[in-house]
Each structure stands twice: as structure tokens, then as C-alpha cells.
Amino acid sequence: MLLFLSVPQPRPPGARTRAGAARVARWRRLRLQQLRRLRGLLRVLRGRPEAGTRRRGRMALCGQAAGAASLPSELIVHIFSFLPAPDRLRASASCSHWRECLFYPALWPQLRICLRVSPAEQPRLEFLMRKCGWFVRELRVEFAAENYLSGGGPGDGGGADTGTGGEEVEALQLSARWLEVLRTYLELVLCVLVSIRNNRNLQKFSLFGDISVLQQQGSLSNTYLSKVDPDGKKIKQIQQLFEEILSNSRQLKWLSCGFMLEIVTPTSLSSLSNAVASTMEHLSLLDNNIPGNSTLITAVELERFVNLHSLALDFCDFTAEMARVLTDSNHVPLQRLSLLVHSVSIMHKSLDNMPNDEHWKALSRKSTNLRVYIMAFDIKSEDMLKILKPSVPLERIHFDSYITCVSGAIVDLISRQYDKFLTHFILMNDVIDTSGFPDLSDNRNEDPLVLLAWRCTKLSLLAIHGYTVWAHNLIAIARLRGSDLKVLEVTEESIDFDQGELADQDVDPVHNLIEQVSLGLGQPWHAVMDIESLSVFTEPNRHFYREMQSFSEDI
């Protein structure tokens, strides 16, 4: 005997009454219309025909309008939110309605722009900032000064020897190109600042000005600036706009300005209200062009920034009084400190006011998670010995030299004092004569780079150019650190071989080096063949600035 049970199907809510059934039917019709609209949208995005050749009447949702064009703005914005920025731009080209939805504030909470200092960039920048400047919450702008000077710097001929007359003509052309770069740079900076002057939603503001192409001798010649801006009106306008942005801000948490040409003055931070200053989490002011003993921030001004988690300054501006302020009980513990040590700053400012070892001990007691990042440009060994106090919790250090060279004693000191903290060690020497790189292990029984790898157990990045690295020492470094050494970048011209390795006819020394280092690291390894591919070498300012940003964000 079979027994059949009839199980009633669940009804939609409100379907028990006649009015409820009508609502359910209306809801189903709306859902069906939405599904048809989405099908039409998918056909447009996939590049398929609208299927209107057979069912034109069924696909027309609003008179003769196409399905994608008739979608509500809220739905288009929601769909755009799942697309990366390039796909959004391509999709917005389908119709004017979609173009209007492209710059909806919710779609662009952050904007990161890298600009070539070129007149061709200005109209594109003006359009983008006009659309997004008034509402963007996070804005990062990098000005990338290309090598307009095709011959290099002012001392480079860049071509054949044309005699005295040819050199004069070339100097005039070079001067004209420099003036054009500087003029364009000022216009682009003005465009950015004007567009965000009334933005009260700005939370992160970061500016980087790659003007190193104009700083061949460490500072920009006032001759070129006076020709571009003879009355100083543009510079004053830029400074006033920057202060206006700071005074209008209400939610600013992150302020970073690095290597910008005379945009920040010693009075700029006074434009910030006490409420904003007390909630600021990151402050970065890097500029080695401030004349004399003037600084961009004083210890008294720093007292207002009680919530700072990360700070980046010129080393000569970071005084013992500032260290004392950061150890006060009303300040939150500082976790990241980035310091730029530049030979130009040391020439004009004194190291007498820098923190001593007791100040660093107090800072470390205040925050056990404090880590320090130091970038040193052409610093003499005797000055580095004064700077490298034993109690500095140094995690990263980057040497970049043009004239002076780092000694083996400095490398040995770093490996002894900071063996518990050091993770990044970069050693760059931009020498012209590649036939005679300095040897750090000269007249030493033990190589300081090998000792660095042995003592610093947390070392994860090692980059070297312009110093002699012996092949057997490179193999030893790879074996000591193994897979923990994530990045090992050594240029080919920096590697040298012992005479015994070269005399062995049965083994190819280069192949053996690659094989042994790869085995030690546990991953394929090759020497850097093209030095121009290393941003840390070609653009040290930009590399330091980006590393400082990620270093400060990684809390």
C-alpha cells in the first residue's frame, strides 16, 4: 500500500490575502525587469550584440533606449565599485550616462598619481583634479622629473666634442630645458593644490617632488628659480595654498611632504588647528633646502602632535629636545622614525643638538616597538660614528654615496650594535670609474659584509653596488642567511673573483657562483646585469620616500 503525502509549498510573505498576492506579483515583475536589465548590461560589457535582431521589442526597456543606458545610477556605481580603475575608465566610454557615474565620490576614496613633469600632463591633471579633488580622502602625488637633459647633468657633454662654441650652445640649450622643467613643475603643483584647497574630507595627503634632476650639487640654483618666478609670486602662492589646505582640513591623519621645492615653510604647521594636530598619526617633512639653521618643525610645535605613531624628518632637525617631547606621558608611543642624513644639511646645520644615547634609551623604553630607518647621502665616516648611537633601534639603513665611501669599520659597527633589529642594508656608491671599487675587506681577515650576515639574524634585504664583493664571500652570505634573505641584489660589476677561481679551467666561476648562491638562498638568483633597472640606484630619493611610506604604514 502506497501512501502519498502532499506537502504544501511555502508562500511568499503577504500572499495569504488578495492584496498580498498582488504585491507578490508586482515584486516578481520588478525582479524580472531587473534581471532583463542585467542581461543587457552583461551583453554590453562582453561586447556581444544586443540580441535585438530577434527580440528588439523585449530588450527595449525605456522606449528606444538600450538596456545598459537605462540602468539607474546607483546600480551602475555599485557595478563600477567591483572594477579596477582602468576597467572603469573603459566602461565609462559606452555612453554619457555611464560617464557621469564614473566620478561618483564613493568610487574614488583614494587617488595615487605619478606625473611626468611635462606640459602634456597639465590638461589631464586639471581634468582629473577638477573631478576628484573636492572629495578624495587619500591623495598621493609624485612628480617624476624625467631626464630632460638628454646629455645628463650640467657637467655631461652628452655628445661629441664640438669645441668651445659647441659647449656654449649646449649650455644654453641645457639651461632652456631646465627652465622649462621648473616652470612646468610649478604649474603642476599649483594645479594640485588649487583643486583640494576646500576639501574637508582629506585624511591622507602625500606629496613627493622629484627635483633631483635639478639638484646636481645638492641644492637648486636660485638663478633658474629667479628666471622662472622673478617676483616669487608663484612660490608664495604655493605656500599660501598649502597653508590654506592645512587650515581647512578637519580629518587629516597623514601628512607627508618630501623633496618638494619650497612648499613647506617653518610656519606651515601653525595653520593646523589643535584638534587636527592632536589626532595626526603620521608626519613627514623632508627637505634639505631650508637655509641656515631654520627647521620645518620645532620641539614646541611637536608638543601639539600627541597622537603621532610615525615621524620622518631631516636628521639635523631631530634634536634632543624633540626626543624629550616624544617621551612625555601625554604622547602616544612613537613606533616608526625615519631620518634623512644629507651632507648639505650637515654643512649648514650642526650635529651638536642631536639626541645622545640616553635620549635613545628613553625613547626605546617609552615604546618597545620603536624602529628607525636612516638614509645617509654622502656622509663622512666620522659623522656616521657620531650619528650611530648604540641604543638606536635601527631596522633599516641606506647609504648612497657620490664622493665619500662607507668604510668597513662602519659596516662592522652596524653589525655589532644593531644585530637584533637590522632587516634592510643598502650600500650604493655612484662612482664613475668602475675599475676601482673600494674593498670593504681590504687588509682584513674577515669580511664585514659576511659578519653582517652572520650577526644580523633578521636581515632580509641586502643590496650592494659600487663596492667590491668577492664571490666566495657572496656565497657565504647566501649560506648564512638562507631563505630568510628575501632580496639579494648585487650588480655584476661589483663582483670579483680570486685568482685561484679564475685559474681553474674545469669550473666556470660565474656559473658556479650563480649555482652556489641559488642553493644557499633556496631560490634562483642572478647578479643585477643592468644597474639602471635598480630604482634604489637611479632614483634614491624616490626609493627612500616610498620605502619610508611603507615603513610607516607597516605598524
Image: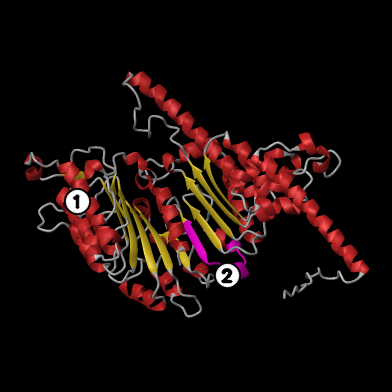
Q: Which residue is mark 2?
A: 279
Residue occupied by mark 1: 516
* Residue at the extreme right of the image, as rendered: 18
Which residue type does callout 1 highlight? Answer: Gln
User: Magenta includes 51?
Assistant: no
- Along the polypeptide, which appears first: circle 2 or circle 1? 2
Are the residues tagged 2 and 1 within 8 Å (C-beta)? no
Where residue 83 appears, as percent x and y from the top left, is 61, 50
- Indicate whether 470 appears above or below 548: above
Outermost residue toward the front in this view:
1
Is residue 247 among what the camera can see? yes
Q: Is residue 190 visible?
A: no
Residue 325's quadrant in the figure? bottom left
**Where in the figure is residue 63, as x and y percent of width and height?**
86, 41
Instruction: Give the magenta-colored segment's residue range.
Output: 270-285
**What residue do we see at 72% from left, 76% from top?**
1
Secondary structure, mark 2, is helix
| Amino acid, disc 2 | Thr
Asked whether residue 271 is drawn in magenta, I would say yes
User: Residue 198 appears at what percent x and percent y?
Assistant: 68, 55
